[in-house]
Image: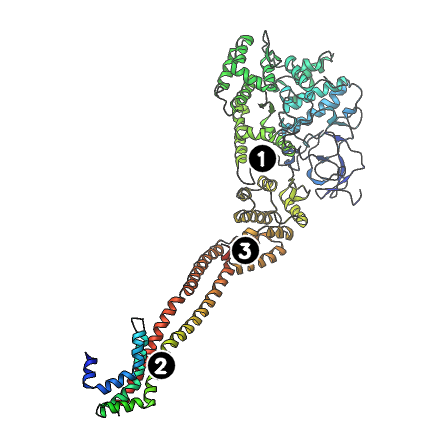
Amino acid sequence: MAESAPLVALYYALDPAALAPRINGVRAYVAQDRRDPARRLLALPCAQTAPPQAGYLALPPAAQAVNTVLPVDFGTGRDPATGAMALFVIFPGLPASSLADLTRPMPEAELIQTVLLPVAAALDQLAALHLTHRAVRPDNLFTAGRNTPVMLGPGFAAPPASHQGAVFEPPYVAWCHPTARGPGLIADDVYALGVTLLTLHRGVVPLAGIDEREIIRRKIELGCYEALTAGTVLPPMLADLLRAMLAEVPDHRPTPAALLTPETARIRRLAARPPRRAQRPIDLAGSMAWSARDLAYAMASTPDAATAALRSGQIDNWIRRGLGDSQLALKLEDCVHARTLDTDDDGFAGPLAVMRAIAVLDPLAPLVWRGIAVFPNGLGPALASGAGQGTGAGLGADAIAEIIAHDVIASYAACLPRARRTIVAEAREWRTLLLLRGIAGGIARLVCVLNPGLPCASPLLGGRLPTKLADLLAALEQASASADRKHPPIDPSIACFIAAHGDGAMQNDAASIAGLTTTADQLAILRLFARLQVRLHPQPLPGLAAWLLAASGASLAHWQSRSQREAAQAQLVILAQAGGIAPMLAVLDNPAERDADRTAATDAANRAKLLATLLADIAAGAPRRKTANLKLGHDLAASIGLIAACAAGLRLALG
Amino acid sequence: MLCGAALTFATAATLLAAILLAPALIAAVSERNPAKPITRAVTLMGVTFTAAPVWRVVQGGNSIAASLDCLTDPAVLATAWLAGACGWALCEMLPVLLTGVSEWRAAAAMAKLTAELEAEKLEWGLDQD
């Protein structure tokens, strides 16, 4: 590989010419680890709006899984295809061809031996690592040739299930915005594996060419297995396996470990009560619902009509009379009418009632807010996708901010079974971060906290994308050469990145930066960078130090004594050239000297007032002095006359 | 009453003194300042050169003739009047002189204070307040 090959994270040289598989629709690059050239790796570029999964990136280096890949490293480098900096995840090599290229239906025996067993083993190991895959589909299964076990491609290089079509996901996941599906359960991977097996056996994707909403509707109405296998004759064993794997309720699906012995897994049947079906449907803005789950989906699709139907009691009536489920009606009333639906002055009670109603009607349903379906643990990638694109293609950051700020997640969790309420404490922490004032709070902080694998994409970095705190300082040092030094080397992106990746002290430092202009802010910025340098980057940073110095005008201006200010400035220039930020902070942030300066300034002001008063007195005293001098002159003349007279008298007396 | 007694009992000497101290009398009449500083100075200076001729007239029998002799001596009259003029001149010049000196000292003090004030302003940026 050429010495000039593009590098990722300093060590991984990319070979754009080498054949590499396409993953998530993006071509990966063959990468060579310069520390171990014999190691064959792949590097996959990730979009800034689709961060890799944090759980995988945090795996210890010793973690291993068979028949799938785990990330070896991640970092930034220049993407040879676009020429721009990008985040790459590095993982072991995969065969170049995927099962999406397969043009023939796969027989049952081959399917079980080469797909089911290896993928089940991979999922079993991921489950042992408390991870889910969420990208099991034919184009992410790679094979070296016929009758060889497949390798499961990476699912961690994008938000969970974000590249899964509605057909590969259970309906309650497929509702969600692609970036907000959350890591889900290993049972959802089993479901996707079931659909994959069906696809490979038939040679075509089930329900191909049908609109995703229609796929979801059919799955809900008919049941997943029936909807997906309609008109297909399957071998008995595969049919039994798929019936179990495509069960509506995750708990009813076999575990990956159970799938390792398919003969046992096929006879494992959990009796699931078929959903209660009404005699007549409820019409919600043109959507006909026959069951509670149908109704939940229809309400999610037409939130305004759902609010009106809830207000008018139409839904309650239908559940009691049409569906004949008075218990569900009672539960719905408890949950929904606990909020005062009648007074919706702030436009908040309606969406909240709809969200609660959907959660009650379908306990597997995601959180649906104003028509947007999300799983709370998928909000991080959703925010990243929205933050990058405003409210366009990504999920609107405003809607997510509203969900977090108004504690909607806690309301959602209150309607769920107790086991699924673990997210509430975490959601309250998010709320605190969202409402945090200053440049290290708000949406930007949440994006960083919820997406720890996301690089810092501040415009101050000049296109560099550091993924770690130590890299951030190096990137700022490089960017300092061409930076506009009137502004400090920090913005909300950088402050939030530091706060999200740093320790408690750094979080406090970042939180103390309210703006960028006041003396207190500039000292807080200096303190933050000094701490970062001491902890993470002991090498000198002359460029960054000079940048900080140039932007510390207010801190220096706050020094009232001109001579001391000039002396400090000279000292700071020397310290900045040496590249030490902490010594600069010691000069600027010296409370004793500042107090002395403040006291001396007060004394000087008093002294100046006194001098001005004296000058005014002298200037105004001319008439008074003239009068006094006139009197003195006259007295002096009289005295001279008196002396002369006395002298004459004495002379006369003495003869 | 004192003047009347002096005029009665020492007419010649009194007339001589009155003529020699004529500038003082003129000053007394023309000066408007109630403290009469010019009159005082002119009188005291005039007395310096009046006392001796008057004493000589008194010693010489206090005669009109002796008194006229003195008056006809230009040295006596001119000296007395010149002394009165000196007293007036002193009254006019000394205040001017003293005012000049004091204004010069005030200007020097102002220059020193202004320099100090400017230095404080420069050091502490007080002119920006």
Residue A443 numbered tag: 1
In the foreground, B62 or A338: B62
Up-down: is A14 above or below A129? below
- Asked which quadrant contains residue A449, the reply is top right
User: Which residue is disc 3 drawn over?
Assistant: A587
Disc 3 residue type (three-letter):
Val
Rendered view: A327 above or below A533: above
Label 2 neighbourhood size at 10 Å, few (<14), some (14-19), many (20+)? Answer: some
Do the residues at discs 3 and 1 belong to one chain?
yes
Q: Are marks 2 and 1 on the same chain?
A: no
User: Quadrant location of residue A88?
Assistant: top right
Q: Nearer the viewer, mark 2 or mark 1?
A: 2
Is A85 on the left or on the right of B129, as rendered? Answer: right
Q: How many marks?
A: 3
Residue corresponding to mark 2:
B85
Q: What quarter of the picture does the C terminus of chain A occupy?
A: bottom left
Residue B77 is situated, as x and y percent measured from the top left of the image, at 32, 87
Residue type pointed to by label 1: Ile
The correct choice, above or below, for A4 with respect to A633 in the image is: above
Q: CA distance from mark 2 to mark 3?
A: 76 Å
- Secondary structure of residue under mark 3: helix
Q: Chain of mark 1?
A: A
- Secondary structure found at label 2: helix
The answer to the question of whether label 2 and label 3 lie on touching residues, with beta carbons closer than 8 A, is no
Please name whichever residue, A238 or A352, is drawn nearer the observer in this view of the structure: A352
Subunit bearing disc 3: A
Label 2 to label 1: alpha-carbon separation: 99 Å
